[in-house]
Amino acid sequence: MSARLFASLVLLLVSLAPLEGCGWRSKELQPGAWRAVLEVPGGELPFGLDVAKEEAGFVLTLVNGEERVRVTEVKVEDGQLTAVMPGYENTLTARISGDELEGEVELLRAGGKTQVLPFMAKRGQAWRFFEKPLTDNADVAGRWAVKFTDDSGKTTKAIAEFAQSFGVVTGTVLTPTGDHRFLAGEVRGDELYMSRFDGASAYLYRAHVNERGELEGEYWSGQTSHRKLLAVRDPNAVLDTSAVATELKDPAVKLEFSFPDLDGKPVSLSDPRFQGKVVIVTLAGSWCPNCHDEAAFLAPLFREYRERGLEIVALMFEHFGDFARAAAATHRFRDRFDIEYTTLIAGTSDTDEASKALPQLTGVFAYPTTIFIDRSGQVRKIHAGFSGPATGQHYEEQTQEFRALVETLLAESGKDTAGAAD
């Protein structure tokens, strides 16, 4: 080796040494368990993130309690991770630096606006809020009657149900329009911490057990929604849904509408394909987590009963008025749940606009709102909201009720049900 070449190699090694000393970071995404965090006004909002390399590419799994959400639309290129949340238009982007990720989550909101949350993750950490739990913690398990107060002073009521194993707490919050899905967290002393990010929305709860044994604290949804909470343990608490109840203005009048399908072709409830059929009409949106839970139930229900005369029509109220963009969001929603029933673009997600689109109803107050119509075209039941799998027994009871009603309506001839609306 010449003296000049030897000197060049020495200089190269010397120049690389500082990189090693400062911790050179790989730009390759490493499989394994990661502790992920979003930043919201209330502080750190943690969730579990598993990374796997499968035959088709990288797959992310979002972990919140018992729930596992697989994210398969993942791109890794030049040290950059990009993932689109399943069934939504929400995205996660991050720079890869060894065992760390740093970037942002972008959430689609009403009016087509976006909300950006800072994101970071570290590989090899399995804890959620605290690395080392305490051994003496308050007991928060059970059913709680909750009062929320927003920043304007308006109050709403809900029910929280928590399960606890030592310091680990899981559960959900049931509201008149649905539930807060799978919350997971910890109790540390008298302090309760709960969070959720499942690709749809980001929730952070922080509360403490006060001297009266109540839960007192706050919760944040994303960057802008904030409420104070006060909860009293009450095993007999009942959820009041009267404020979101929807009815026909005239029960004797049949529901009618005409909206375009995803190809722009108008579809009416009076079309021949719906005549003499049992029809479920659901008012939904691809942006709505509780609508996702309902679609996961309705899609197989339709395949099971369509040969017996069941039709399902989803009226999609999206966050934007542009038809092409609304149709694209609905296509993503259909693909997520393998939906084969009819989906129509009915308008924007604003409930006032939705009420105008369906003037025969007393109003639209919740997504989803589900309307059951018998073979004669009479509305037999309207149900506002949907309690998803995170609610456990409530979900089982609700889906059993829906299924039993479908069975009853399918068994009717149609001729004998005229005027049977209730």
Image (spheres, rainbow, N blue to C red):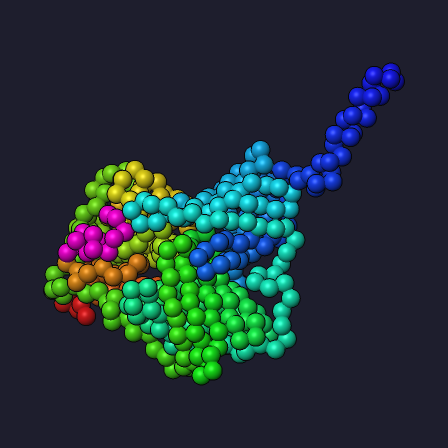
Q: Quadrant of residue 382?
A: bottom left
User: Residue at coordinates 41% horizontally, 50% vertically from top-left?
Assistant: 337
Quarter of the image that includes the N terminus? top right
Instruction: Estimate the x, y position of residue 353 in percent, counting from the top left.
Output: 20, 52
Instruction: Estimate the x, y position of residue 243 in percent, counting from the top left.
Output: 24, 69
What is the total number of numbered labels drawn onto the structure image? 0
- The verdict on residue 52 being magenta is no
User: Residue at coordinates 70% horizontally, 41% vertically from top-left?
Assistant: 23
Left or right: residue 344 compared with residue 134: left
User: Residue at coordinates 61% horizontally, 78% vertically from top-left?
Assistant: 136
Instruction: Estimate the x, y position of residue 306 in percent, counting from the top left.
Output: 33, 54
User: Between residues 42 and 266, which one lies in front from this camera angle?
Assistant: 42
User: Between residues 2 and 47, which one lies in front from this camera angle?
Assistant: 2
Instruction: Estimate the x, y position of residue 39 in percent, counting from the top left.
Output: 48, 54
Residue 381 seen:
no
Q: Quadrant of residue 10?
A: top right
Left or right: residue 361 compared with residue 84: left
User: Residue at coordinates 84% horizontally, 21% vertically from top-left?
Assistant: 6
Residue 115 seen:
yes
The correct choice, above or below, for 354 with respect to 206 in the image is above
**Span shown in magenta:** 347-359
Quarter of the image that includes the C terminus? bottom left
